Image (cartoon, rainbow, N blue to C red):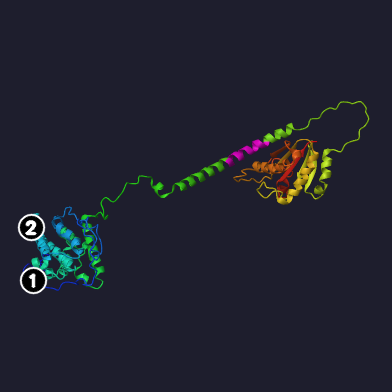
Amino acid sequence: MSQDDPFSNYLDEDKTVLKPSPGRRNQNADTSSPTLTQNTRVDSPASYRQDSSAGTQQLNLHSDENVLVGCALPLLSLVTQLRNSASHADVSGLRNAIINEIKTFDTKARQSGCPVDQVQTARYALCSLLDEVVLNTPWGCNSIWSTQSMLITFHKESWGGEKFFQVLNNIISQPGTYFNLLELFYYCLSLGFEGKYKVQEQGQNKLYDVRENLYQVIQRHKGDYEQDLSLHWRGITDKRNVLSRYIPLWVVGAVAAAILTLIYIGFLYAINQSSGAEIGAQYQIKDTLNVKPEVVKKIQPASIPEVPQTPVIDKVRQFLAAEIAAKKVEVVDENGQSIIRILAKNFFASGSDKIQSKYLPLMQKINQALEIVTGQITVVGHTDNIPIFTVRFPSNWVLSQARAQSVANILLANEHHQNRVLAEGRADTQSLVPNDSAKHRAMNRRVEITFKD
């Protein structure tokens, strides 16, 4: 026995070994035949990794640089067609045709320069595969094949289910020398050859491990293979930006809108902060110009004294006497102007320009009192010195203007006040008392209605 020949223990042309055929198909099994595949092909050993029981799946065979596999392609292509055949009219003729094809394989492989021992081993593996496939069909197990199989014809053995794996174990450690043969063995396993594992407990799991180990050896020696079943399955390449493929357009729009909103709010805040001082200065100039000048009265000749009339401000005080007594309002004369100052606490909701509903009757009473007045009416809103910054009220100027306008709108609902009511906001520029306590800040948050006789 040679130490360098891995086949010396297994392949002996003069030795006859007879073993019973492995588990035949159940005669009661379903013999319906699926549609035969005429052009059965397999991509590569790495592209078809199925369980050995899934023999009806198609394989796409090509030889690449493997001369041994290239010579065996016609035989390998028969496997799926034979397995899927429910019957065959001429088993003897089929047997003779396959014998001739095996002889052709043998001749072509030798002529291509394949070592003789590897050609014999490959022939043994192919015979074992073809015999197992045919003998597991309804028409093959009871035919001439059961006594004159390919193994008996070429190797004088009736079953290769054991020796196939013994040879594989012997050569798998030398992939550099026997790579072509290992690849052919992988094709046989991928095409459904089970051998001894068909009848063993947990045989399918063991067979999967054998096939997977063989695949890893082939992969390490030759490199990874394309594992897709089709070489041209990919469609048109999506050249869009990666983000646009995974982020919906509406999300991008929403984020952009949010960013623009934040920018707008930031600019609004900056503008209101920088413009507050200028607005205050403008109102100071206006108030200065509105000071009533002293006019030298002409000396009038003595006349009959007239009965003095009650000033308008006194009439307003009389009309609002109950509200003044309840300290809801006060009516004062300051800097030549008559002022109705609303003193009610929480007249507006916090941070809002909406008048509390409980004070609407008070506003109606003030509205009626102003019917006595015939001149211009100005509603002025005031705040404390605590800044406010919301989308609706970005500054105290805006808030004080909005509160003054709310009061003015009630007055304008009275037909007596049409076209003579104005609204102004003064923020915290005209505080009554210092904003040094909560009580004082509450006093400074007010609305004043000025009028002229």
Residue stretch rendered in magenta on the structure: 268-280
Residue 159 point in image, percent of width and height: 14, 70
Of residues 8 and 424, the one drawn nearer to the viewer in this rendering: 424
Say whether residue 144 is left or right of residue 342: left
Residue 176 within the segment the image draws in magenta: no
Quarter the N terminus occupies = bottom left
Instruction: Quickly name the residue at label 1.
Output: 16
The circle drawn on residue 386 is none
Secondary structure mostly seen in the magenta stretch? helix
- Report which quarter residue 103 is drawn in: bottom left
The residue identified by callout 2 is 107
> Relative to 295, does residue 321 appear above or below in the rendering?
below
The answer to whether 238 appears left or right of 321 in the picture is left
Judge whether residue 269 is colored magenta. Answer: yes
Q: Is the C terminus in the top left, top right, bottom left or bottom right quadrant? A: top right
Q: Nearer the viewer, residue 268 or 205?
A: 205
Q: Position of residue 124 (x, y in %)?
A: 12, 64
Q: Identify which residue is drawn at 79% across, 45% down.
A: 330
x, y (%) of residue 202? 26, 71
SS of the residue under disc 1? loop
Note whether 16 is above or below 305 in the view shown.
Answer: below
